[in-house]
Image (cartoon, rainbow, N blue to C red):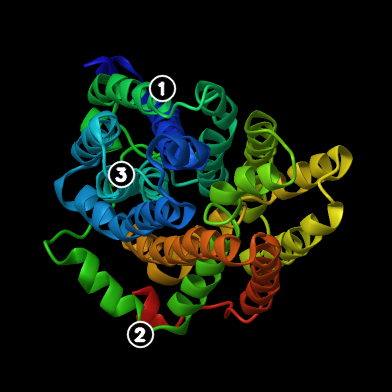
Amino acid sequence: MLHRRASGQKYAFIVIAVTFVTLLVAAALRSAPSVMIVPLELAFGWDRATISFAAAVGIFLYGLSGPFAAALMQSFGVRRTMLWALALMATSTLASLWMTESWHYILSWGVVSGIGTGAIAPVLGATIVNRWFAARRGLMMGLLTASTATGALVFLPIMAWLTRNGAWTPVALTVGIVTLFLIPVVWLLMPESPAAIGTVRYGEAAGTPAPAHPRGAMLAIDTLVAAARTPMFWMLFGTFLICGLTTNGLVGTHLIAYCGDNGISPVQAAGLLSLMGLFDLVGTTASGWLTDRYDPRKLLFIYYALRGISLMALPALDFQPTGLLLFAVFYGLDWIATVPPTMALANRHFGEAKAPIVFGWIMTGHQIGAAIAAFGAGLIRAETGSYLLAFTIAGAFGILAALMAVTIARKAPRAAAA
């Protein structure tokens, strides 16, 4: 295979590149329903609450499948898990081209797509970083985390352009084909571990033994049971639930529709999300760099507080171009900058072997919050005719998460870290 021709620890960066692209495509698929809301309404006559429910199902399963995917990566291999997930993603999107009923949409873009993308969620990034890097973990985690938002946001204008004539099928076809293309790339370029190609992790001395990874059919459940006994787990779970509620559940799913309510075209609104994606690449990568150097708890306080303030300020901007531009830049820098410090705390308190699985369960909280916001904001819009209340509530929860973050203990109990 090609990876056998790579030398030493330099291959770690090839692995990062392949993982980055894979996360980019998975995120683009997960965000596609946001540009399909109006075309699906026009094509099938489904109401917004029904379409939002499918998005909520996908978001929830995206999070729930994460810890099990992390356990599968430990027990059966990273590459096998990635290939299985990519096959599910391609199948769900391409099969939806023949859907005629709302339950077809829920099954394809909600259930199957949610499970597939969940297996290539941030737990993949956490697993890759811990497996391939002994140094610069925060920076690498920031870079991979940024790809999940950048893929979702940067490609939104392209997907919005594909729906310019009111058709949703070009989006499904394009995403399905790109996902299929990734399968041979992962097969050829993704080794199982540094030991598989005769090297060590980046930042480790030659000859360092490879770290042991726990295995077992019940690994995900056993890890959850142990982690759930610690206050740290619930603090991280709760703050990340609010993280999901304030990002892809609300803004990622409904901002385009919210802008449409205020006279902004889908392509223009998708451009705002794309701008957020570009600034997220900067902000989240910088967050990883900061996490390597500063207290993660203080970083989380700052990130959540700024996010809450920005969400509550958005309705007051009256959707004028200058105000929206400022919101896109400010919010984009903070989009998912919370991931590197959250993962750093998971590593610190639960150990690097189990941290990716624990992070997967924390990510489940993120997606529960996102699912609540995806469905709840659609319901609020249907009942009140406006998204104003949804954004105000989300902003208040952002402030609450900031206060929760500063209560996180500096050191883990010995039992939790074991």
Q: Quadrant of residue 257?
A: top right
Residue 395 in picture, x, y percent from top left: 70, 67
Q: Residues within 10 Å of mark 3 (few under 14, many from 20)?
A: many
- Mark 2 is on which residue type? Arg
Q: Residue at x 26, y 44 (%)?
A: 101
Where's the N terminus, which quadrant? top left
> Hey, which residue is sitting farthest left in the picture?
217
- The answer to which of 206 and 336 lies nearer the viewer is 336
- The answer to which of 285 and 238 lies nearer the viewer is 238
SS of the residue at dot 3?
Answer: helix
- The answer to which of 135 and 255 lies nearer the viewer is 255
SS of the residue at dot 1?
Answer: helix
Residue 15 lies left or right of residue 375; in this view the side is: left
Pick whichever of labels 3 and 1 is earlier in the sequence.
3
Can you identify the residue that label 2 sits on? 229
Can you identify the residue that label 3 sits on? 105
Q: Residue at x 56, y 68 (%)?
A: 242
Q: Residue at x 71, y 60 (%)?
A: 307
